[in-house]
Amino acid sequence: MKVLVVGGGGRENVIVRKIAESPRHPEIFVAPGNAGMADVATLVDIDAMDLEGIVSFASTHAIDYCVVAPDDPLAAGLVDRLEDAGVPCFGPTARAAHIEASKAYAKSLMAAHRIPTAHFQIAESPQEALSMLKNAPYPTVIKADGLALGKGVMVVKNFNEAELAIRTIMEDKKFGDSGNRVVIEEYLEGPEVSVLAFTDGHSVVPMVSSMDHKAAYDSDKGPNTGGMGAIAPNPFYSPEIAQRCMEEIFIPTIAALNAVQRQFKGCLYFGLMLTKDGPKVIEYNARFGDPEAQVVLPLLKTDLLTVMQAVTEERLADIDVEFSDESACCVVLASQGYPLAYESGKPLTIDPEAADHAYVAGAIERDGTLYTHGGRVVGVTAVADTLQEAIDGAYRLADGVHFENKYARHDIGARALRELESQARRRHQAESEG
C-alpha cells in the first residue's frame, strides 16, 4: 500500500511515524516533508500548496491513500482535487475546512446553531472595527478572519492597543488577506483545552485532551507562536466536562456542518475555554493541531491508518479507537528569536536516545549533515505513567538535541502539574472530612 502525507512540519513527522507502525507496512511518501523524516518516508520535492503537482504525483505513482495535514492546502481544496482524481483522502473538503479558514464563518455557524462561544462582532473595514472597539469592554480579543499560522489573535487591554492591532492586521496586512476582515470578541477566562476528534460526518471520536502552550516565553509571556509545547491529558478536562462538550459542542458542530452541506471527514480540532458558565469554543481547526498531535498520537493504541481509512469510508462507528492511559509531554526546541527574527542554517545533531522521541519540524540536509531550517526546529516527546515523569523525560531528551541558539520554554506542563496537585489536596481534604 502506498500512502502520501502532505506537509512538512512536526505534525506531519508524527503522522508519518505513526502510519509507519501499521501492521500493513505501507510505503510512505511525504510532500515536501523535511530531512528529519527521511529515515521512514521518501521525501517528495513538491510544495504542499502545489495542488496540481501533488495530484499529478499521486496519479503517476499509484498512491492508494493520501493524508492532507496542513490548513492551507485543505482550505484550497486539495482533498477535493485528489478525490476527483480517484485518490481517497483523510481530511475535509474545502467547504468543510472553511470552518477553520474563516473565523467569521465559524462564529456565525455557532451563533446560528446555538453552540456556546464568546459574544462577537464581525468588521469588514478598519473604520467599522474601530467604531465597534470604541465601546468594547476591555480586555477584548481581535482575530484576523483567515488562516494565520496560529498567530492572528491579539488580546488588547485598551482602545490604544486596539487601534494598533487593527492597523497591524487590516492596514499593514501582517497576515496578508487573512486580515481583510476581523472578528472582535468577548475575552473569556478559564483553563484552555484542546480536543482533537476523529469524525466521518456521522460519528465523533474525541482523542485524549491536551494543553497547548502558545506564548513564546515562560509564564505565558511574549508573542503567540505556533506552539512551544503540549501535554496530554489535560487535567482540567474532567469526565463530566467531556460529556458536556460531547452533548453541547461536538455533536452539534457535526450536525451544524451537515445542515449546511459541509460534511466534515477528518480530524476536527476543538479549541475550548472552560469558563465559569461552562465550556465554550474559542476556535476550530480542520486538522491535527501542532504540537498537540505530538502528544496525542503517541498515546493512540489503535492503528492510525485503520482509523483514518474508517473515517474516509464513513464507518468510524465500526471500529474501537483506543488510547493509552499514560501521560505525554512535548517540548518544542526553536531558533532563538522565534516567532520574530531568527537564524536558520545551523548544524543540527540529535543524540541516539533523543532521536527515538524527536519529531523534526524544520531541517534540511546537505552533504550528510542536518541544518536548522525554520523557527520551530524539533519537538521531543516523552510518554510515561505520570505527567511529572513525562515532563522530566521530555526535558532530559531535549538536552540531547544540539544546535546553536536553541531555545525552549522551561515551564511546559507546569500549570497542569499545579492543577493535579490541587486536585490531590481537594481529594485528601474530602477524605479527611468524610
Image (tube, rainbow, N blue to C red):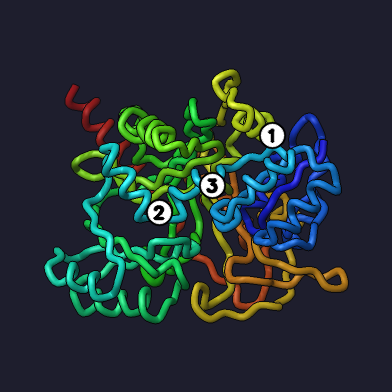
Q: Are marks 1 and 3 in contact (CB under 8 Å)?
A: no
User: Which residue bears the numbered disc 3?
Assistant: 287
Q: Report, in whole angstroms, how far the alpha carbon at label 1 lies from the one at label 2.
A: 33 Å
For the C terminus, the quadrant is top left
Q: Residue furthest top?
A: 318
For label 1, count other residues whose C-alpha is less than 10 Å away and answer few (under 14), some (14-19) or many (20+).
many
Count numbered badges in the picture: 3
Label 2 to label 3: alpha-carbon separation: 26 Å
Q: Position of residue 248 (x, y in %)?
A: 30, 32
The residue that label 1 is drawn on is 305
- Circle 2 sits on which residue? 414
Q: For numbered disc 3, what is the local secondary structure?
A: loop
Closest to the camera, between mark 2 and mark 3, is: 3
Residue at 69 percent of width and 55 percent of height:
354
- In which quadrant is the N terminus drawn? top right
User: Could you tell me if residue 125 is visible in this image?
Assistant: yes
Q: Nearer the viewer, residue 121 or 149?
A: 121
Q: Tag 2, which secondary structure? A: helix
The residue sitting at 39% across, 30% down in the picture is 251
Residue neighbourhood size for the residue with mark 3, other residues' Cα within 10 Å, grouped as few (<14), some (14–19), many (≥20) = many
Helix, strand or loop at disc 1? helix
> Could you say where residue 210 lies in the image, as x and y percent from the top left?
45, 44
Q: Report the amino acid beneath label 2.
A: Ala
Q: Amino acid at mark 3?
A: Arg
Residue 35 is drawn in which quadrant?
bottom right
Mark found first going from the N terminus, 1 or 3? 3
* Mark closest to the chain's N terminus, 1 or 2: 1
* Crowd around label 2: few <14 · some 14–19 · many ≥20 (10 Å): some
